[in-house]
């Protein structure tokens, strides 16, 4: 058999022009699919734990940075890493070693000084290794030696500001893998406590300097709502920090997009109704839980939120249950938690069955549905394709029309910008020699298709009732120029939706559906198929100029009794499935 591989991109570039998206509309109304065919695909949540490593349970790992640089992290512990970088050797107030021998050894201290080039290179190399590992990272930087919880380690304020400026240069280069910056820099564990030098003004000044010195896609989190309020310009937050108040509206207008960039991390999460002091008990002088949750609900819609969930303190209300998270988690858009702490609580979640029904996560249908699995699968976003309508046939104009309904069933939303595209592929037999043609094309869609806007459910408190006012179903329409391929009339082509990083095409979202296309080896959402109609033009092979001809030319490799068709940087088996 003679096997032919065709390069679709070059072919279509010759006859159809540049790929163009003609229209896209997000809506929350019912799908209007006039002239389209509803696709017979599996629209249920497969209930598998997805490999989307910009959300979920993280693993912590400490990096000790020295003036001489030290050793970078070469092997990250996990795909979602909590990088606890400490620069204690750059603080004269941080003791690195203490004499416990009665004077036979010296107590050693750090030295307040500029971060060295070697130190910054170690941080950059660590980010490079996380990227090579295909991972993402939540970053916290502080002066607590080896994150042992030592108090009064923060250097003089002017040194903190100098270090912020230096660190900002490295952080700005790595926003493609940084989920969020937990703005440590002060106190034990970088949690903004246990240090007499800490003031609200100093934390606000350092945090605002970091905001000004880094690009807007870097989300910056402080330890409590009070600190975030001060960063945003609130002084009397017990009175003014109410999202429906006049003062709040005034500050929100002045801050603009910064309001959506500043969030908080919570290392006392669910331990008490106050989250161990994260929220205030006196709402006249501090931000109480409901005010803080309402703020996160509205302004943290695309900002990571999470931390460490704790066991319940004695004589306090128990709220650290999967059932409580199945309510409040959607309001706070909870997206990440520590897998190691609190380990006793994590173990309890693993042994406890989830008791409520949440769409496909139904205890009556799944006997072994634990609270841990429910939480693990719902941290951050979780996209399920619920309905798909496509053109039955793409005619000579090359326009493919689609209407999709995608439900975000996760606690939160996508927190970074990503690119959507359509992956179109198929094969057919042609001519007297029964030639096998392999088609493969990736159609980039414009920025108007923004999966950061595929929002999760919205919950409102109405008197004594809790009401879901939006169920996470997001609908949109696409008209895309996919080209028309002469000679392929009547051939069925499959379509998949891909959502990938702007900087790394291999970093793609995994959808919760089972992919219905057997040959697919990736995480795309299979949205259906269409038939190619008759084209008006005559197919004339397009020739690449000069050296590009050899670089882009497909070829056939015979391996044992099979054949593999190579097309640019991808290769396909004879049945059309992608190989390794």
Image (tube, rainbow, N blue to C red):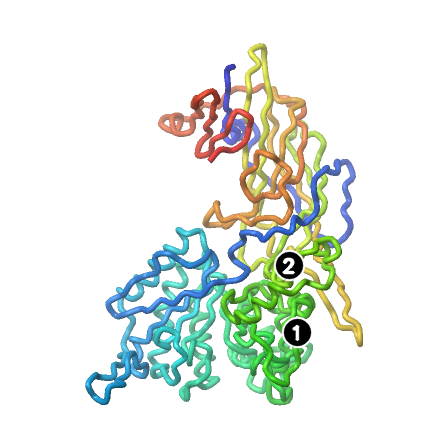
Is 87 placed left or right of 283 in the picture?
left
Tag count: 2
Which image quadrant for residue 147? bottom left
Crowd class of label 1 (few under 14; some 14 to 19; many from 20; radius 10 Å): some
Which image quadrant for residue 56? bottom right
Q: CA distance from mark 1 to mark 2?
A: 18 Å
Residue 468 shows up from this direction: yes
Going from the N terminus, do you reach mark 1 or mark 2 first?
1
Residue placed at 55% from the left, 16% from the top? 435
Question: Residue 358's spot in the image, x, y percent?
Answer: 72, 59
Question: Residue 216's spot in the image, x, y percent?
Answer: 49, 63
Residue hosting label 2:
410
Residue placed at 78% from the left, 39% from the top? 34
> What kind of element bears circle 1?
helix
Is 122 placed left or right of 442 in the picture?
left
Question: Residue 191's spot in the image, x, y percent?
Answer: 46, 77
Q: Can you say whether 512 is above or below 336 in the image? A: above
Q: Can you say whether 436 is above or below 199 in the image? A: above
Closer-to-camera residue (170/541): 170
What numbered label is drawn on residue 434? none
Residue hosting label 1:
294
Q: Is there a contact, CB below 8 Å, between mark 1 and mark 2? A: no
Is 572 placed left or right of 514 in the picture?
left
Is 552 placed left or right of 93 in the picture?
right
Which image quadrant for residue 140? bottom left
Question: Residue 411's spot in the image, x, y percent?
Answer: 64, 62
Closer-to-camera residue (131/403): 131
- Which mark's residue is nearer the viewer, 1 or 2? 2
Q: Can you say whether 134 is above or below 194 in the image? A: above
């Amino acid at each position: 058999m003679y096997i032919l591989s065709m390069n679709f991109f070059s072919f279509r570039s010759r006859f159809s022009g540049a790929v163009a998206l003609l229209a896209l509309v997000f809506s929350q109304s019912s799908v209007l699919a006039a002239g389209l065919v509803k696709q017979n695909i599996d629209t249920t949540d497969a209930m598998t734990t997805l490999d989307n490593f910009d959300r979920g349970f993280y693993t912590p790992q400490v990096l000790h940075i020295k003036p001489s640089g030290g050793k970078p992290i070469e092997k990250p512990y996990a795909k979602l890493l909590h990088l606890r970088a400490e620069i204690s050797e750059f603080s004269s107030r941080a003791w690195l070693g203490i004499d416990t021998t009665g004077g036979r050894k010296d107590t050693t201290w750090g030295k307040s000084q500029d971060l060295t080039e070697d130190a910054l290179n170690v941080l950059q190399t660590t980010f490079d290794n996380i990227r090579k590992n295909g991972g993402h990272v939540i970053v916290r930087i502080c002066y607590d030696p080896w994150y042992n919880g030592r108090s009064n380690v923060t250097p003089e304020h002017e040194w903190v500001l100098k270090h912020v400026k230096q660190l900002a240069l490295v952080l700005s280069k790595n926003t493609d893998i940084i989920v969020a910056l937990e703005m440590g820099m002060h106190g034990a564990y970088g949690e903004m406590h246990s240090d007499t030098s800490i003031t609200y003004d100093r934390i606000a000044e350092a945090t605002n300097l970091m905001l000004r010195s880094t690009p807007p896609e870097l989300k910056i989190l402080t330890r409590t709502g009070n600190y975030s309020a001060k960063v945003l310009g609130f002084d009397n937050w017990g009175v003014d920090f109410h999202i429906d108040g006049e003062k709040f509206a005034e500050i929100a207008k002045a801050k603009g997009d910064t309001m959506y960039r500043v969030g908080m991390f919570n290392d006392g999460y669910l331990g008490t109704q106050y989250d161990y002091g994260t929220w205030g008990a006196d709402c006249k002088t501090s931000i109480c839980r409901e005010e803080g949750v309402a703020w996160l609900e509205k302004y943290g819609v695309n900002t990571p939120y999470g931390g460490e969930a704790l066991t319940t303190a004695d004589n306090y209300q128990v709220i650290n249950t999967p059932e409580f998270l199945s309510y409040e988690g959607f309001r706070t858009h909870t997206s990440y938690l520590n897998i190691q702490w609190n380990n006793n609580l994590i173990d309890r979640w693993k042994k406890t069955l989830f008791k409520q029904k949440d769409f496909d996560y139904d205890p009556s249908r799944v006997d072994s549905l634990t609270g841990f699995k429910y939480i693990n699968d719902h941290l951050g976003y979780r996209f399920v394709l619920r309905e798909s309508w496509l053109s039955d046939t793409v005619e000579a104009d090359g326009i493919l029309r689609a209407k999709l309904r995608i439900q975000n069933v996760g606690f939160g939303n996508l927190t970074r910008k990503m690119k959507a595209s359509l992956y179109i592929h198929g094969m057919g037999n042609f001519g007297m020699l029964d030639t096998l043609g392999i088609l493969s094309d990736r159609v980039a869609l414009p920025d108007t298709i923004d999966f950061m806007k595929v929002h999760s459910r919205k919950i409102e408190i109405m008197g004594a009732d809790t009401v879901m006012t939006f169920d996470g179903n997001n609908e949109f329409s696409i008209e895309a120029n996919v080209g028309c391929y002469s000679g392929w009339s009547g051939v069925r082509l499959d379509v998949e939706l891909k959502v990938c990083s702007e900087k790394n095409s291999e970093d793609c979202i995994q959808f919760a559906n089972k992919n219905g296309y057997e040959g697919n080896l990736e995480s795309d959402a299979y949205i259906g198929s269409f038939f190619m109609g008759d084209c008006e033009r005559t197919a004339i092979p397009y020739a690449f100029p000069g050296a590009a001809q050899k670089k882009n030319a497909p070829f056939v490799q015979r391996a044992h009794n099979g054949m593999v068709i190579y097309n640019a940087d991808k290769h396909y088996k004879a049945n059309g499935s992608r190989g390794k």
